Image (cartoon, rainbow, N blue to C red):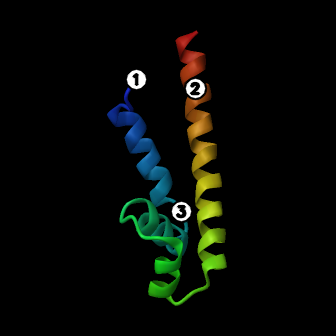
Amino acid sequence: MKLINKETLSEINAAINELPDRCRLIFKLIKEDGLKYAEVAQLLEISIKTVENQMSIAVKKLAVVINRMIAEYKTSAS
């Protein structure tokens, strides 16, 4: 199993940093700080549904970047 190299990690972090401000904040509170959706909703004084929607946006945008990276890796490995 391969570990993520520094370049890949850097690209993922760049993609996270390109998320809209509120979306990035919610993503980091959940994924980096380990807060639950309800905790983030209470902290930011928004609904849990808003947290869910913002996380969905973040995951979809990051999936696009990761899928592109996978496709580039497969192309270069051929």
Tell me which residue sits at (54%, 16%) in the image: 76
| Residue 49 at x, y percent in the picture | 66, 77
**Residue 2 marker:** 1
Q: Position of residue 35 (x, y in %)?
A: 42, 70
**Which disc number belongs to residue 19?**
3
Residue 9 lies left or right of residue 69; in this view the side is left
Residue 60 locus on image (x, y percent)? 65, 53
Do the numbered discs 2 and 3 sit on residues whose CB atoms are within 8 Å? Answer: no
Residue ID at (58%, 43%): 65
- Tell me which numbered mark, 1 or 3, is placed earlier along the sequence: 1
Amino acid type of disc 1? Lys
Q: Nearer the viewer, mark 1 or mark 3?
A: 1
Residue most extreme to the bottom: 45
Q: Residue at x 61, y 46 (%)?
A: 63
Q: Amino acid at mark 3?
A: Leu
Mark toward the start of the polypeptide (1 vs 2): 1
Camera-nearest residue between 37 and 18: 37
Residue 61 image point, x, y percent: 62, 53
Q: Quadrant of the C terminus?
A: top right
Q: Secondary structure at mark 1?
A: loop
- Name the amino acid type tagged 2: Glu
Q: Earlier in the sequence, mark 2 or mark 3?
A: 3
Q: CA distance from mark 1 to mark 3?
A: 27 Å
State if disc 3 and disc 1 touch (CB < 8 Å).
no
The outermost residue toward the top is 78
The residue drawn where x is 45% and y is 66% is 30
